[in-house]
Image: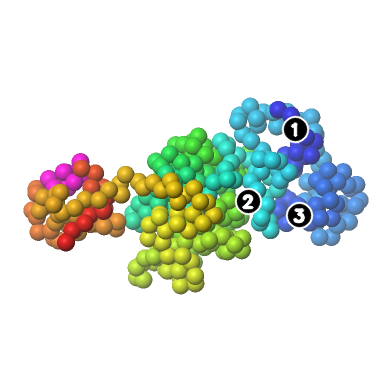
Amino acid sequence: MACSKQKLLWYAWSKKENIGYKETTNLLAYYGSIEAVLTVEADEINSLEWLSDSAKVTILEGIDLEKEYKSYEELNRKDIHFVVQEDLRYPKRLLNMYDPPWFLYYLGELPDEKLPTVAIIGARACSAYGLEVARKFAKELAMNNIQVVSGLAKGVDGYAHRGALEGKGKTFGVIGSGVNICYPRENYQLYHDVEYQGGVLSEYPLGSPALAFHFPVRNRIIAGLSDGIFVVEAKEKSGTLITVDCGLEQGKDIYALPGKITDQLSIGCNRLIQNGAKLVQTASDIIDELAGRYPFLVNKRKKSKQESIVFENQVTDEEKLVLMKLGYEPVHFEKLLIDTGLDTVKLMEVIFVLQMKGLIKEISAQYYILHTIFVYS
């Protein structure tokens, strides 16, 4: 695949260690181009007091263009893409940031600039309720042609991607490692599913490990790619709020799921709402907000099949008892025994029937949630 000299230089630069974003920015401001930076004489580079010694050594190592071109060709053979800011494919939304990544590696594709995009974020160690909300909202957004962005991490991130996949929509994972590194390993299949139904992208070169300081930095890209950011669950001092701060700096809409004031995982969301974030209770709340900028959302509204409505005259008295005790927050079998007054065998029978009808769902061992809208007098 053809590659301009400028892009090849950026590709080589992307793999250099010991030179961070800030130093790259300062060097470009001083010399004007990446080519100029790489052709500066040793005496001049060494005279720059504001440049770290490690960066000076790295720059003076030089670049073997022939070797880099072969490496770039190998990259393309692996279907790994590399874009710089000057490329037509580079996400234009990112250029509105004050610190857009100079380059991106990605698998799959990049978000469609013409379609709305929502970032869904939250705690890694989240509740079963948070996981279900992330999945449910992402699915409905995806069904309405809204792209979903998240970080391919444990917890809310992973379930947001899964929901978007279920909704047959596009979803994109921004990661804090090289795109050939799957972290956490338990998300291996999800990582590849996201690649094939959207894309996985990073500003870190191949082989870069998932270091702790990479994640706050990548959060600005998650924010930058989105029209709005939906926070599902977050503690008061959660890393999730770094993404929110990035979004606020970039003028993004912030949405938050309200929660109990006694729940540690809801403190961050409740505080965001208190400070002006939009309170959302359904995916439609977000879709309505986006419809002003994307008129097609008004005419093509779709809802997940699980949003069916069941009336009390459609179920037995025992089924009604169970349905009335369930919502989107998980309830354990033992609590249902107490709350419904049914005996163990009967309750097991009713739960089995309700699961077969698709009206309730077991999300972990003997924990159940409502999987429909139940209307009763």
Q: Is residue 183 left or right of residue 364?
A: right
Q: Is residue 83 above or below residue 48?
A: above
Residue 66 screen position, x and y as percent: 79, 29
Give the quarter of the figure containing the N terminus. Answer: top right
Mark toward the start of the polypeptide (2 vs 1):
1
Point out residue 232 in the picture as x, y percentages from the top left corner: 42, 58
Quadrant for residue 51, please give it.
Answer: bottom right
Asked if labels 2 and 3 touch by Cβ distance under 8 angstroms, the answer is no
Circle 2 sits in a helix, a strand or a loop, which is it? helix
Give the Cα distance between marks 3 and 1. Answer: 23 Å
Tell me where residue 270 sits by quadrant. Answer: bottom left
Residue 333 visible from this viewpoint: no
Q: Nearer the viewer, residue 207 or 258?
A: 258
Q: Which residue is mark 1?
A: 3
Sequence-wise first label, 3 or 1: 1
Q: Is residue 94 left or right of residue 358?
A: right
Tell me, for residue 93, which label it has, or none.
2
Dominant SS in magenta? helix
- In this figure, which residue is indicated by the disc labeled 3? 25
Q: Residue at x 87, y 43 (%)?
A: 39
Tell me whether circle 2 and circle 1 mark residues in contact (CB < 8 Å): no
The amino acid on which the numbered mark 1 sits, given as a three-letter code, is: Cys
The boundaries of the magenta stretch are 349-356
Q: Which quarter of the figure is the C terminus placed in? A: bottom left
- Is residue 302 toward the left or the right of residue 146 in the image? left
Disc 3 versus disc 1: nearer the observer? 1
User: Is residue 129 among what the camera can see?
Assistant: yes
